[in-house]
Amino acid sequence: MDDANRSSNGKAPRDSRMAFFIMPTTLLRTLRDTASRHLGDEEKVRSLLFECGADCGRVMVRKMEISSEDKVDIGDTITALWIEIGLGRLSVKSAEEHELVVICDDSTEALANGDTGKMICDLTRGYLVGIASTLTGFEWTCTEKSCLSHGDPECVYVLKAK
Ligand SMILES: [Zn+2]
C-alpha cells in the first residue's frame, strides 16, 4: 500500500466498503422502542425507520459501485446484497418490469419485535426501496402484505415502481 492510502496516524485505513455485520435483534427492537418513546405517534416511528432503511439501502448500492447504468437484474441483485445486510434471507416470488414481490421467512426485524399483530418491517421496507431506487434510477414504493410479526408464515414485500 502506498503512502497516499495511509491516514495521518500512519496506519492503513480500514476499508469498510465490504463490511457487514449481523444485525443485532436488540438494536432493531431498541431503535423502535426508543423512537416510539420520543415520537409517540406510530406513523412517525414507521416513517423514521423506513427513511433510515432507505438511506442505508442507497448508501449500500453506491458503495458497491453499482448504478442504474449497469442495468443489473434487480431481483438477483437485491437477494445478493441482502445477504450482507443481516435482515434475514430474501427470495424473489415474482418479478415483472415494474413490480417485484419478495418474501422472507426469517425477517430479523419481525423476529426482533415479536408477535405484535402488525406489519412491523419498516426498516426492511426502507432498505428495499433504497436499494431498488438506486439500482434503477427511479423511485419505488414497498408495501408489506404479510408479516411474521402479524402472525403470518412469512413476510411478503411488494415493490412497485412509481
Ligand atoms: Zn415483516
Image (cartoon, rainbow, N blue to C red):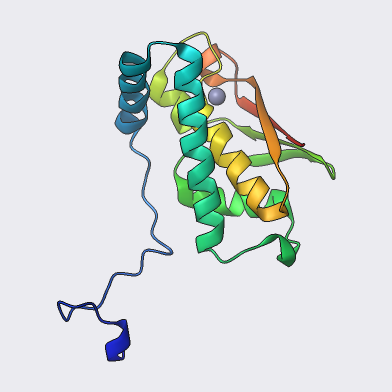
Q: Seen from this angle, which residue lies furthest bottom?
A: 2
Q: Quadrant of ligand 1?
A: top right
Instruction: Judge whether 137 appears above or below 112 on screen.
Output: below
Left or right relative to 126: residue 146 = right
Left or right relative to 109: residue 94 = right
Q: Residue at x 39, y 54 (%)?
A: 20
Q: Seen from this angle, which residue lies furthest right?
A: 97
Residue situated in front as seen by the camera: 158 or 88: 158
Residue situated in front as seen by the camera: 98 or 149: 98
Q: Residue at x 53, y 12 (%)?
A: 118
The C terminus - image quarter: top right
Can you give x and y, in whole percent of width and height, for residue 44 in the image? 47, 19
Left or right relative to 152: residue 49 = left
Can you give x and y, in whole percent of width and height, for residue 117 in the image? 51, 8
Can you give x and y, in whole percent of width and height, for residue 61 in the image? 56, 56
Instruction: Judge whether 4 appears above or below 17 on screen.
Output: below
Left or right relative to 79: residue 23 = left
Q: Can I make out residue 88 in this image?
A: no
Q: Can I make out residue 87 in this image?
A: yes
The quarter holding residue 80 reads bottom right
Q: Residue at x 71, y 48 (%)?
A: 75
Q: Seen from this angle, which residue lies furthest left?
A: 9
Q: Residue at x 35, y 69 (%)?
A: 15
Residue situated in front as seen by the camera: 46 or 109: 46
Q: Seen from this angle, which residue lies furthest top?
A: 117
The quarter holding residue 100 reads top right
Can you give x and y, in whole percent of width and height, for residue 23 in the image? 37, 40
The quarter holding residue 67 reads bottom right
Instruction: Judge whether 21 appears above or below 122 on screen.
Output: below
